[in-house]
Image (cartoon, grey):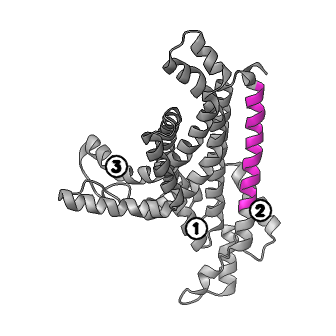
Amino acid sequence: MWLFLVRRLVNYLVLIVVATTCAYLLAASALSPRVNYENQSPRPSEEAVDARLDELNLNDKTPLAERWVVWAGDVVTGDFGKTVTGGSVNEEMEIRILVSLRLIIAGTVLGATAGVGVGAYAAVKQYGVFDQLSTGAAFTVLAVPAVVVAISLQVLAIWLNGVAGETLLVFNGEATPSLDAGFFGTLWDRAKHMFLPTVALALGQFAVFSRYQRNMMLDVLGSDFVRTARAKGLTRRAALLKHALRTALIPTVTYFTFTFGVMMAGTTFTEKVYNWKGMGSWLIDSIATNDVHAVAAVSCFMAVCVMAAAFLSDLLYAWLDPRVRVG
């Protein structure tokens, strides 16, 4: 099993390097930091602009391969370069990564766990009321874009706050500015700000995993090994949890990697809607400001997150499937 995991980890590291390199080359080819200086008043001279862009390693007059070599050499040492305004990309990343990870981890855990549980139970109660209701809810969420879900939750929060006569649900920013409420007060304030964007992300995960897990569970409910387990004296509950659900989770764990990519896209829109200063919103702002190094850094972060999810799915796959451990 360990050889399998090490081999997969090496493959993922190579993929991260390739994905980050492609992102930099695409951003450096498509974005033009020089445009940022054309609308300044007074407009700087071309020589001054060239000198500034050379300082930032963003001069489009320098061959792309040469710029990439300089940038890649810095990245190897852990430095993603300077932003288009001259700030440190690393310092900006340190602030924004934790913001995005809070949403991604909370939304993924909540949505995937709820989706797997609801999907498995819906399969056991096939064609029942619970199955029909969960199916309708899942397809409704799947049919609505992530940005519409986020905005709809905001509208619902405004209505609930109006009915209650107080602010129960907060939907702007990560925390209340200049709040002095002590440790627990600050923690509660951040939890209130985090609730709606987390739910917005979790709903998409719930819809996908509930449908997928239901189908996988239905495939194994009538299998011989489940009937054999019952014939040996196991209760229906024990047979379903120990044998049917565990087997049905194997393809779901593999599917987890692909849905994580969708999660990253959903985080981008959710951060903008709820005014969270995370990696997703930074990506949109960086494209608008022609910030090549920031776009490459965010792309690297996304690649690392997706590959980390893939490696986690490999670990879970090895734990669930004895054939991987034996092989």
Where, by quadrant of the figure, is residue 197 drawn?
Answer: bottom left
Q: Earlier in the sequence, mark 1 or mark 3?
A: 3
Name the main secondary structure of what is drawn in magenta.
helix
- Tag 1 residue: 286
What secondary structure is found at the residue carrying circle 1?
helix
Foreground: disc 1 or disc 2: 1
Instruction: Name the quadrant containing residue 169.
Output: bottom left
Name the amino acid type tagged 1.
Ser
The stretch of residues the image draws in magenta is: 3-23
Relative side of 47 to 87, left or right? right
Residue 92 part of the magenta segment: no
* Tag 1–tag 2 contact (CB < 8 Å): no
* Labels 2 & 3 near each other (Cβ < 8 A): no
Q: Residue at x 38, y 53 (%)?
A: 196
Say whether disc 1 or disc 2 marks the residue closer to the N-terminus: 2
Q: Amino acid at mark 2?
A: Trp
Point out the image quarter for the N terminus: top right
Q: Foreground mark, 2 or 3?
A: 3
* Residue at image mark 3: 190
* x and y percentages locating residue 238 in the rendered image: 51, 18
Establish if 79 lies above or below 236: below
Q: Residues within 10 Å of mark 3 (few under 14, many from 20)?
A: some
Q: Nearer the viewer, residue 184 or 40?
A: 184
Residue type at the position of mark 3: Arg
* Residue under the point 49% across and 37% down: 122
